[in-house]
Each structure stands twice: as structure tokens, then as C-alpha cells.
């Protein structure tokens, strides 16, 4: 495909302190006014540094999955501990305790303002439905609503299918599904979790995950939007939960997941080598996540150029692009760097992309 967003971004941006304070203290109407003002500011900043695809920084969300949690009923007060690696402690998701039902649109409150005010094409991000059985199904609690993780998953799928179809109709050019749970199938520790805790064969669970995401993603492509999947190994206050290259899932995922674009984490050795990209079908694009959103240190231009050149030995350069490896604030608290460091990294993405893909 002809891909025009050579300098890309995953979605979320660090929340300014005023936004964090507004979420805690202000009524929804007054908070929306603060959000609007800061969204307009980051849209202008994205345009100024030269980005051609625009997000609202996920400023209206409590986290990258927040729209789902805010728009459904069926989740209880029980919290489920998660296992993270890195400098801080991780968040605790809610357990499902009843049948999940959407009480409204997930992103309508975001997309209208964004499409109206963005100075160019709009990207909207959504979590994969595969997120929620993995993190919200609690043994001894959730069985009263769903007999299995799989039953829970397929009750979620129609919610995302309808939402993505609506986004394509509303003029969103680029729909990105954030799917970090695919890292469960590349890390032996988490493959064991799938088998032991979720009671599923990992290979069968991977097949089901692809089917579920495809059911959600296809309406974007039918509506003329670019469909993308973002894969990482966890991103919460500069932490991660999984390690390993894409090799165990590359052939199946790259060929069977019905997306145009893969945004792939590649900023550390945790992600393995580019060799797995040999399975990428002709015509699909890989956005190389070579710039860390976890660390404050600015990547060198020469270092990025070397890595892009290395990847181009496996995938034609016209099928590559560049971005940070993940969002800067998958949770509202954000990763452990400053807003200035964040923007310098995005500027580095743009200037490097212009050099590799001029025009």
C-alpha cells in the first residue's frame, strides 16, 4: 500500500498537570473545557513539528483502555493484581462480575472534536478486545457472568466492531487497535499463564485472538480507513511485563491479522531482531518503534538511520515508517520523562523520517 505517514505516533501524550488536576477536581463539563484547550494545543504542536497524522493525545481518557471501562456495565469493584517489570508499581484492573453491555459509544465524545479541529488526517486508537479477558477475568468471581475467558471475549467483540464501523463513517482516516496481549504468545512466562491461569492452549488462544481482532478491524477497511495494530510488551509508568522477539507469532500474525499496518516495538533488545519481519506479506507496512517512550534519553539520528537501514534488508524501505515504540502515557500518570523530552523525541522521529523518505 502507499503509506503517507512515514513519521507516526502511537497515540497517547503526557498529560499536563492542569489536565490531571481537572480530572480529579472538576465536573465533566468544566473538565471538557480544559481538555478542549489542551487538545487544541497539542494538535497545533503536532502540526508545527511536521506530523501528518493527528491524535488528541488520549487526553479525555484515564488510560488507553479508559473508553471501554467508561462505556460499559458489568465490571465490579474487585481488583486483579498484575505483574510488571520496571521502576514503579502497576495498576490494578477491575474484574468482570456481570454481563458486559455498552451503555453508549466508546469514542463519540472524542472523535467529533478531533475531526472538527485537527489540521489534517485523524488517528483514533482503541484497545483490542483481547485485552479484557486477559486482565478482567478473575477466577472465583467472573464465572457467575461468563463460563470462560472465551465467552467473555466474544461478548466484547460486537462493541468494538460497531465502534470501529462508526469511526470510519465519521471521517477517521486511521484506526489503530492497541494489542499488547499478543506478547503473551512470545514470552514463555506468559504462554504458561495462558495455559495455567486462563485454561487455554496458547496456540488455540492465539488463533482466537486473531479472529476476534479481525471481526473488529474489518469495518475500518470496508469504510476506507487505514486499519492498524500496535504491539508492545506493556507500557505503564515506564514499565513492561513481557519480553521476546516476534518470531513465534510472526508468520501467523503478519499473514492472518487483517490490517494494513503493524506498529511494532523495537526500541530495546526485549523485542528481538528484525528477522521476524521476513514473514510480512507484500503490501503491508511496518512502523518501526525505534524511539523509546519509556526513557528520557534522546535517540541519535545516526543510530535511527542505522536501524532503519538494517530493517530495510528484510522489508523494502517503501514498506517501512518510524515512530516511538508506544504511547507516552498509556496510563494517565504517564511515563517517566518530561513533556519537553517527549516533544524532542517526536521531532526526532519527524526529522529522521524526512531524511529517509523525502517528500
Image (spheres, grey):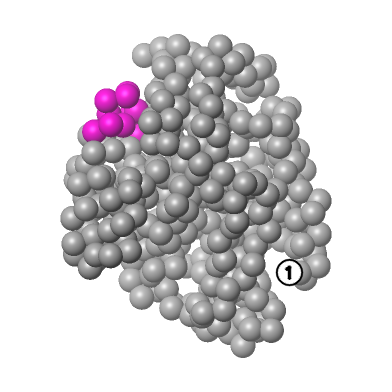
Q: Is residue 276 above or below residue 348?
A: below
Task: Looking at the picture, tell me which residue is in the foreground, 151 or 77.
Answer: 77
Relative to 223, 323 lies left or right: right
Instruction: Report the residue at 39% width, 42% height from top.
Output: 13
Instruction: Report the residue at 61% width, 31% height from top.
Output: 267
Of helix, strand and loop, which mostly describes the magenta segment?
helix
For the question of whether residue 3 can be seen, the reply is no
For the question of whether residue 160 can be seen, the reply is yes
Instruction: Report the residue at 34% width, 28% height from top.
Output: 51
- Magenta segment: 44-53
Q: x, y percentage for residue 155?
A: 53, 73
Q: Secondary structure at mark 1?
A: loop
Q: Quadrant of the C terminus?
A: top left
> Residue reaching furthest bottom?
144
Q: x, y percentage for residue 23?
A: 31, 61
**Badge 1: residue crowd in 10 Å (few <14, some 14–19, many ≥20):** many
Residue carrying label 1: 198
On whether residue 46 falls in the magenta region, the answer is yes
Task: Looking at the picture, tell me which residue is in the foreground, 100 or 45.
Answer: 45
Task: Looking at the picture, tell me which residue is in the foreground, 266 or 249.
Answer: 266
Task: Looking at the picture, tell me which residue is in the foreground, 175 or 40.
Answer: 40
Amino acid at each position: 500500500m502507499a503509506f503517507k505517514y512515514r513519521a507516526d505516533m502511537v497515540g497517547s501524550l503526557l498529560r499536563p498537570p492542569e489536565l490531571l488536576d481537572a480530572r480529579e477536581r472538576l465536573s465533566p463539563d468544566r473538565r471538557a473545557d480544559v481538555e478542549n484547550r489542551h487538545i487544541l494545543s497539542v494538535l497545533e504542536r503536532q502540526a508545527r513539528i511536521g506530523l501528518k497524522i493527528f491524535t488528541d493525545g488520549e487526553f479525555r481518557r484515564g488510560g488507553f483502555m479508559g473508553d471501554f471501562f467508561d462505556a460499559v456495565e458489568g465490571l465490579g469493584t474487585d481488583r486483579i493484581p498484575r505483574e510488571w517489570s520496571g521502576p514503579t508499581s502497576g495498576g490494578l484492573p477491575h474484574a468482570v462480575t456481570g454481563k458486559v453491555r455498552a451503555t453508549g459509544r466508546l469514542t463519540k465524545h472524542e472523535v467529533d472534536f478531533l475531526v472538527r479541529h485537527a489540521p489534517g488526517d485523524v488517528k483514533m486508537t482503541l484497545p483490542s478486545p483481547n485485552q479484557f479477558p486477559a486482565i478482567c477475568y478473575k477466577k472465583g468471581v467472573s464465572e457467575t457472568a461468563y463460563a470462560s475467558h472465551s465467552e467473555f471475549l466474544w461478548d466484547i467483540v460486537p462493541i468494538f466492531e460497531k465502534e470501529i464501523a462508526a469511526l470510519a463513517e465519521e471521517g477517521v482516516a486511521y484506526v489503530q487497535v492497541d494489542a499488547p496481549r499478543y506478547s503473551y504468545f512470545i514470552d514463555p512466562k506468559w504462554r504458561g499463564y495462558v495455559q495455567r491461569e486462563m485454561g487455554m492452549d496458547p496456540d488455540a488462544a492465539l488463533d482466537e485472538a486473531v479472529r476476534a481482532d479481525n471481526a473488529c478491524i474489518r469495518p475500518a477497511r470496508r469504510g476506507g480507513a487505514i486499519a492498524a495494530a500496535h504491539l508492545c510488551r506493556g507500557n505503564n509508568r515506564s514499565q513492561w511485563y513481557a519480553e521476546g522477539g516476534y518470531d513465534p507469532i510472526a508468520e501467523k500474525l503478519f499473514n492472518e491479522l487483517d490490517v494494513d499496518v503493524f506498529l511494532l516495538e523495537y526500541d530495546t533488545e526485549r523485542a528481538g531482531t528484525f528477522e521476524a519481519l521476513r514473514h510480512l506479506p507484500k503490501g503491508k507496512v511496518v512502523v518501526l518503534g525505534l524511539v523509546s517512550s519509556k526513557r528520557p534519553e534522546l535517540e541519535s539520528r545516526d543510530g535511527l538511520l542505522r536501524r532503519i537501514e538494517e530493517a530495510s534488508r528484510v522489508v523494502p524501505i517503501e514498506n517501512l515508517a518510524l515512530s516511538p515504540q508506544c504511547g507516552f502515557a498509556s496510563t494517565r500518570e504517564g511515563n517517566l520523562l518530561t513533556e519537553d523530552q517527549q516533544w524532542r523525541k517526536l521531532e526526532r522521529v519527524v526529522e529522521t523520517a524526512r531524511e529517509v523518505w523525502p517528500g
